[in-house]
Amino acid sequence: MSTDTQTYSIHNQRDAIGEYADIMGYDIVATYEDPGRSGLNIEGRPGLQRLLSDIESGNADFETVVVYDVSRWGRFQNIDESASYEYRCQVAGVRIEFCAEQFANDGTIGSDVLKAIKRSMAAELSRMLSAKVFLGQRRVVKMGFCGGGLAGYGLRRLLVDESGEPKFILKRRQYKGLGSDRVVLVPGPPEEIAVVRWIFSQFVKGKSRIEIVRALNKRGVLTEMGRTWTSNTVHTVLTNERYIGNIVWNRKSEKLHGKRARNPPSAWVRAEEACEPILDRKVFLRARAVADARTPLSNEQMLADLSNLLAERGKLSEHIINSAPGCVSVSTYQARFGSLYAVYKLVGFDPPPNYGWFDINDQLHRRRREIIEDLVASIGLAGGVARYDPETKLVSINDEFTVAAWIARCHPKRFGYPHWAYSQERLPEADISVLIRMYPDNVSVRDYLIGPTYQVQRRTTMLTANNHAGVDAFLFQSMDPLVELSRRVRLKGPALS
């Protein structure tokens, strides 16, 4: 179940399964539960993962698994995924029975058809609920209430009741407890408001983000997270419309536990004059105009400059590009087009045959560093402390444990099936090891193998698309398990002292 208030409570399911077992003459020897979990993907289902692992490893001392109904097996958006997990149990000699369904899961045509329909209905219900929740959140934002997330530097979240009467200011990691309550944004401490206005005034006067960062850190000013300022945090302030009273929601979305994606401006939900402004609108628009004026060259102009350099020199290399006064740096080309190899193809230059391989390596190294930086930032937002040491290549989290992250390129096999090879010797010694598996384009991340180092190094050094449960149990779609672990360690720390 995903919430404690559902009809499908753990207790209701357990009672129904117990009655079914009595009727069938079964002895219940083990129970696998996923309380407070969504059934959209297996990454968030430790109970189901443990069940599959026990069955496929031969540790299961049972021959039947009783599930309340088809939806409790999972609301997987691809019904074939649900079928695949049941098939893995059947291959291992364990059958699945649904005690609340009106059909016997006996493999007959009628049973298979009804089961496929039920799986589709379970998946569709999740999609319908997702759409309804989105519409509800959209309406709340349109009414001028906060749609979630941090308030922002210089602002605070005020909890109000259903009649709009103020209750109290919510502190960090505090949330409303009643569904009828709402959250509105209000001005924060005067000293923070003064810092916000100072940042805008300096930027309008021509100061760069880096210069503003250095000045703030030199003065000892900290962000709302209690951390030093960075170029990204200054950029967040300069682009936050909440300072002029506007609330913008749905810039990014992660529907049905899918990949987090940026939405086009046409999909954003806006509420004008929803909260009290702390900055003059003219100053905000002036800062936006200054930022637009500092926008770098267009893609066409950058490629034209590089084509002219190729015609002049007859070849291209990192040294030639960085030395040319009429071209931007190699790092700028890589950031804009993804890789230098892609830029070479766009301007018609054929690099050495092995250049593509090394270019992908450089690209993967940059992607790995980006993922580590995102992990450090996410842990910071969760209230933890994470530091990356480029010498040891380890991430220290809350000074409690270390994480080593490595990246594996995707290699297609002879018949097109992908595999991922990695060297255990290259993984630094750490408490937890992370192997980042890429898609065949070696640009997008497929998943993350996250587990204790001693467990990961015991596994095979060659991973395929489908491995045994002992490996797949450690596969996740994001680094969220590490973020959650850092939060638990952080919360547990004071109790230990």
Image (spheres, grey):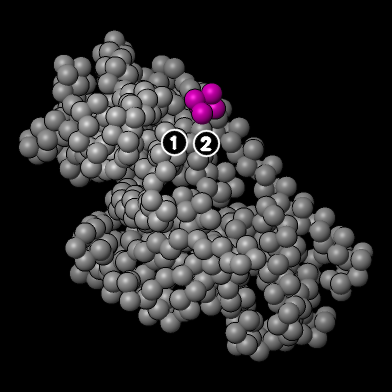
Front-most of 465 and 31? 465
SS under mark 1: loop
Quarter of the image for the N terminus: give it. Answer: bottom right
SS under mark 2: loop
Residue 267, above or below 431: above
Can residue 458 be seen at all in this image of the molecule?
yes
* The stretch drawn in magenta includes residue 266: yes
Quadrant for residue 288, please give it. top left
Can residue 306 be seen at all in this image of the molecule?
no
Q: For mark 2, what is the residue?
A: 180
- Residue type at tag 2: Ser
* The stretch drawn in magenta includes residue 181: no
Quadrant for residue 83, please give it. bottom right
Residue 43, above or below 165: below
Query: Where residue 135 appears, x then y in whole percent?
Result: 61, 32
The residue that appears at 33% across and 76% down in the rendered structure is 425
Q: For mark 1, what is the residue?
A: 348
Q: Which residues fall within the magenta stretch? A: 264-268
Query: Where residue 40 appears, x then y in whole percent?
Result: 62, 55
| Residue 362, numbered circle | none
The residue that appears at 54% across and 23% down in the rendered structure is 266
Work out whether mark 1 precedes mark 2 in sequence or the reverse, and give the earlier one: 2
Query: Where residue 248 appears, x then y in whole percent?
Result: 44, 26
- Residue type at tag 1: Gly
Type of secondary structure dominating the magenta stretch: helix
Q: Residue reaching furthest top?
A: 282
Front-most of 116 and 495? 116
The residue that appears at 66% across and 89% down in the rendered structure is 61
Query: Where residue 494 appears, x then y in whole percent?
Result: 24, 64
